[in-house]
Image (tube, rainbow, N blue to C red):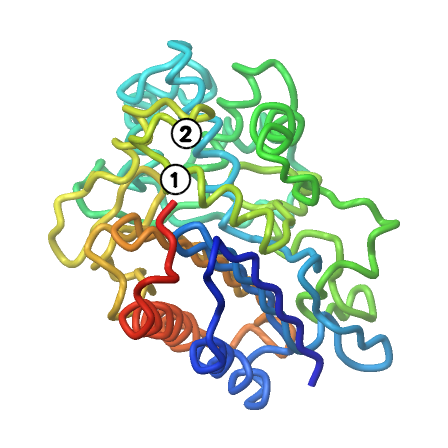
Amino acid sequence: MNEYWSVEAGSGWTLSEEAGAGIRRPIVEAIRERLIPGASIAIYYRGNLIRYAAGAAITGLQERPTGPNTLYDCASLTKVAATLPLILQLGGQGRLRLDDEASMYVPELRSDRAARITIRQLLAHTSGLPATHDFHSLPWSLERILTFIGSELSIEKPSETAVYSDLGFIILGAIASRLYGMPLDEAAKRYLFAPLGMSNTGFCPDPAKLDEIAATEWSEELGGYWRGIVHDENARALGGVSGHAGLFSTAGDLLKYAQLWLNIGSGEASLLPDSLAKEAIRLQTGGADSSRRGLGWVLKGDTADVSGAWMTSGAFGHTGFTGTSLYVDPGRQLAVVLLTNRVHYGRQQNITGLRQSLHDAVVRSLVEQAEKYPNPIQSN
């Protein structure tokens, strides 16, 4: 099996063979069990960077190994790694407020309920909007989709219990694009990815980079795998750029973004307004029925939380349908990015256990190493 390791350690720190084996084990087992063809992970822990990749980015006659620079379809990580930070930046600039009605910026939201939905409710998935709607079989523009959501779609009353909604982030993507005066992908590149040095991150990847992109699902329509074209049908219908899905990235690039959230409150997170970033990781839902959502983020204890047993109570993160996840644990100064193409073998593959096992293995391995060899661990 193809494998890759890289460790960028602080002064005097090394990853022990025992800890490395613990981190590697869940990935290798998942590949052998054909849950996933391959994976790329990146870990930040107290100033140390660990990268590991294993398996294949695409199987069959075109099989290619997964590496640290393999691009993955991030799916719903788009929500927290592109749309959320752009909205928070706009809030920090005074161009919007979280409790503004979204219809101030998207006048297509005309029905009584749609017109009263706030930006906060969209971010927290408490707006009453349904999870999704089939737009990909309709030749509709974004404006027509927004009109449908705002005038024709049945919307429930806002609730303290989150109902995860792609539609809310389609609206948020439109707000960001309109206020920045440019397409969402351009705004994300200019105001987020470029400043963070995320040079391998963006929407609609260059076809010339096809060999560097992990394939997602088999397509009868194509007679091959979706590769370099967004897997999410609604995002695909919108040209590959949407607030809810469409982003492609590498584990290393997403780790740079995750580190931004580790620096909240330290004065180093200059790309995000500190007060709004803190608000984003504060409980926004009622907490009933294990509904624990921040703004965009899934908080520890939510029904969708896959942080595992070892991350602290302040951990937060998000997953993506294609097999991706990003988790941040400020209490441990830890961030973990897992990128897989779990739909490669079919949508039925469930990797909840893999995500939790990896997070547990990472925390357990690194914490046990820190306790066994306390002096070499460097605090940043």
Disc 2/disc 1 C-alpha distance (Å): 7 Å
Q: Quadrant of residue 93?
A: top left
* Circle 1 residues within 10 Å: few <14, some 14–19, many ≥20: many
Question: Amino acid type of disc 2?
Answer: Ala
Task: Identify the residue at horizontal 30%, vertical 35% (top origin).
Answer: 280
Residue 173 pos. (x, y %) = 52, 30
Q: Label 2, on which residue?
A: 269
What secondary structure is found at the residue carrying circle 1? helix
Task: Identify the residue at horizontal 53%, vertical 26% (top origin).
Answer: 174
Q: Residue furthest bottom?
A: 33
Residue 310 pos. (x, y %) = 26, 68
Question: Amino acid type of disc 1?
Answer: Trp
Q: Label 1, on which residue?
A: 261
Q: Residue furthest top?
A: 94
Task: Identify the residue at horizontal 83%, vertical 56% (top origin).
Answer: 210
Q: Image check: 164 left or right of 238?
A: left
Residue 217 pos. (x, y %) = 67, 68
Q: Is 43 situated above or below 189?
A: below
* Circle 2 residues within 10 Å: few <14, some 14–19, many ≥20: some
Q: Quadrant of residue 282?
A: top left
Task: Identify the residue at horizontal 26%, vertical 51% (top origin).
Answer: 299
Q: Image check: 249 left or right of 263?
A: right
**On-image quarter of the N terminus:** bottom right
Q: In the image, which disc is placed on residue 300?
A: none
